[in-house]
Image (tube, rainbow, N blue to C red):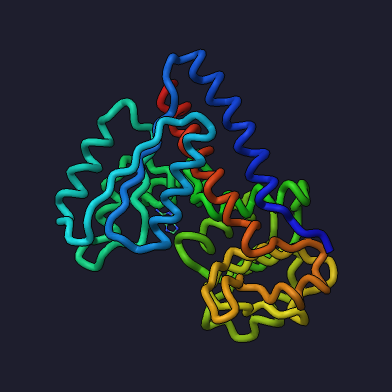
Amino acid sequence: MILIDGKKAAAELRAVLKQEVTELKAKHNKVPGLTVILIGDLTPSQIYVRNKEKSANEVGLKSEVIKYPDSVEEKTVLEKIRELNSDKTVSGILVQLPLPKHIDKQKVIEAIHPSKDVDGFHPMNVGNLSSGYESSIPCTPLGCYLLIKKFEPNLNGKKAVVVGRSNLNGKPMTQLLLKENCTVTITHSKTKDLKAECLEADIIVAAVGIPELVRGDWVKKDAIVIDVGINKTDKGIVGDVHFEEVSKNARALTPVPGGVGPMTIACLLKNTIDCFKRSQI
Ligand code: GUN
């Protein structure tokens, strides 16, 4: 079994992006800028945002974090987004999720101009992705896709099973695999026989948020297994895949942590740079 090292792949991607930023700076005399809005004091969100800022600085992006208390009014956030939409020094805007209950997530997502939507959550980008047009692609599925392609460049005709149908992961992951000519099955909590579906798969992407759901006897010998899960349990952080069991069967597997997570952040930087490049044309 080969361990797919997301930490290493992310470091390699960041090195490429850093070089790209240097070249863009020489050409345009400015660097791409990422602005992250963080609302409230949820610890995981704070850690994610700190990591995003650190990585952005590492590759030479201009990065800014705007923090609001939990009690901030929705209209204050929407006004800030509108201001950032017309700020030429800002290439990408990300509002860290989840949001407090009194703030409408969809309104916030739709307020971000699609050309600055580094999350790829705006309906315009969702539609463009599913139509096969150029778009921002959600960072986590993009990271999974790059890891799969690095390991297996030709996905033509492969059977892929995506476990989970979220807008954040499952649905965009399906689009990316379809684009690579995979035959994709998207499964979810109402799927009749999840084990049987997984046993058909050359590629499994588990993004469902259930600790260690995918077991060793769900996976056929040659499968590539990508674990998107980050679940807090009594034994610490575990993925959606039972690592020990699946590592005995799969051809390749991503660990948790150190698999998809680092790639997600590197892809956010990539999306910011891509938004900048599209804005310079
Ligand atoms: N919270 C957890 N993952 C994400 C993500 O990919 N984007 C945003 N905006 N918030 C998140």
Q: Is 169 in front, or is 264?
A: 264
Count of numbered labels shown in the rendering: 0
Vertical arrangement, residue 221 with respect to residue 74, above or below = below
Residue 256 found in image quarter: bottom right
The reply, left or right, for residue 263 in relation to residue 166 is: right
Q: Quadrant of the N terminus?
A: bottom right
Q: Position of residue 266 (x, y in %)?
A: 56, 44
Q: Residue at x 60, y 37 (%)?
A: 14
Q: Residue at x 39, y 56 (%)?
A: 46
Image region (quadrant) for ligand 1: bottom left
- The residue at 34%/50% (across/down) is 95
Write the residue at 63% across / 78% down: 212
Asked if 230 appears above or below 92 in the picture, the reply is below
Hey, which quadrant is residue 74 in on the image?
bottom left
Q: Quadrant of the C terminus?
A: top left
Residue 203 drawn at (x, y percent): 72, 63
Is residue 191 positioned above or below 25 on the image? below
Q: Say if 20 sits above or below 124 in the image.
A: above
Q: Is residue 115 visible?
A: no
